[in-house]
Amino acid sequence: MSYTIPIGPYHPALEEPYKINVTCEGEKVQDVDIAIGFNFRGIELLAQRRNYIQDVTLVERVCGICSNVHTMTFCMAAESIAGIKIPARAGYIRVIIAELERLHSHLLWSGVAAELIGFQTMFMEIFALRESVMDVLEAISGNRVNYAMNSIGGVNRDITDPDSILTAVRGIQKSLEKLVIPVFTTNATVKARTAGVGTLTREDALIYGTVGPTARASGLELDLRCDQPYAAYGELGVNRVVQTAGDVQARVVVRALEMLESVRLIEKALQTLPSGPIRIEDRVPVIPLGEATARAEAPRGEVFYYIASDGSDIPQRVKVRTPTYANMPSVRAMSRDQQLADMPLIQASIDPCYSCTDR
Amino acid sequence: MNDLENILQKIPGAAPLVSKPDGFWMIAPDLNVLELAKALKEAQAHFSTMTGSMASEKETSVNYHFFINNQAYNFKALTRENKIASISNIYPAAEWIEREIQDLYKTEFTGHPHPERLIRPTQLEPGFFREPGGAASKAKR
């Protein structure tokens, strides 16, 4: 006889509200029903009541982890309507911040994953390493969480001392190569807890419209940094990381290897940082009548923005689609016939962000 | 005009595709979105999302955002009496966003398999996003 277990909306593993009702037959999961909307903030509605400058600050609050990618994508959509081309140096700085953000986001997730599989020492090591990344972000932007780096037409702060950032990033690379990558790719405990667990087939990944590392771990070669390069990704070149197993281990490996790719991109961007201005001269550009979409590869996958403008200083409509919104429904496919005890790990393996999702 | 564009032009209510910096756009108020979804599914298009926005006091503009071979395609349709066909049976990935637009704009997606509340706070009525943005929002306040 089947029974249903509600998990959430306050989950002990993830400090954000959502709920899944898990239907089980014995210890085997038959189906899950996912409920969101516990942290709805109406950010899109607020955005159509505020001007563009205020909205850059507002959308930075969509997510507390990938805050930078939201302001960047919002600015990209506005720049597309206005036909603004940002200076080359600004494009490179946008890449550096975006990749530092990816590093700290993947490290955060790796730490949570380590804790979920019962690897407490690894959790502590990873969170200590993440602090180093936060220090670099703070050194550049003055902030640890909401960096306020992006503006319509460029970036707000320059990187004045690339050498010190380079030294710090190389230190992070050493720790990644020495500790994080070997543990997540070869450690027997990690493999035992993740291999064959929560498999998402390539077909299901397509049907559910998954994005980011979740999609790439199921063999989908989707990475906007390669597919539709923006900022300076076209000049720097990105090696996409793809796995085909589709299980939790594949998601772990994709994120682990992507951290090394992020380090490579940061190093290359710092070494080839062009000179010149960091933003266009017009500090408050007019966004004319029009509409545009913009997409960027956030740590969790594609972030989508749509802006409609009537030519005033307030957008008519701002639409935000976060990666977890696209990935979360696929947990249903990952969970079927899995052990109930693996559910926390499975749903955490998409690196969910519910506050982003609810907006 | 390539094969896909030929197929898209044959969909009832279709309009010419316009190339913009962010991809192709089709502004087609009377577009048959079910036929559109079938054609795009056939072309192995990846569903990105949909955007609802208030078109008038009673109607909602619904944008469909897809990409095919790294090229973005955007289709702008309009509801009739605030109703439009659901594409969730063709693209299951559209199920949540259709429910969200239903919550925010009170739009009915006919044929939706699970038209329940998704994101709306229970103390609010459906359609609470139906207010003008842009300059009109300033005038209203």
Image: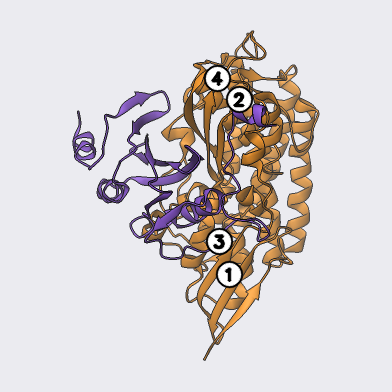
Q: Report x, y in % for residue A102.
A: 63, 40
Circles 2 and 4: CB atoms closer than 8 Å: yes
How far apart in space, not on screen, are marks 1 and 2 (Cα)? 58 Å
Q: Report x, y in % for residue A84.
A: 53, 15
Residues at marks 1 and 3 on the same chain: no
Callout in the foreground (2, 4)? 2
Instruction: First in sequence, mark 2 or 3: give its number.
Output: 3
**Tag 2: amino acid:** Ala
Residue labelled with disc 1: A192
Q: Residues within 10 Å of mark 3 (few under 14, many from 20)?
A: some
Residues at marks 2 and 3 on the same chain: yes
Above or below for A337 versus A80: below
Instruction: First in sequence, mark 4 or 1: give its number.
Output: 1
Residue labelled with disc 4: A311
Q: Which mark is residue B117?
A: 3
Camera-nearest residue between B76 and A221: B76
How far apart in space, not on screen, are marks 4 and 1 (Cα)? 57 Å
Residue labelled with disc 2: B135
How far apart in space, not on screen, are marks 2 and 4 (Cα)? 8 Å
Callout in the foreground (1, 3)? 3
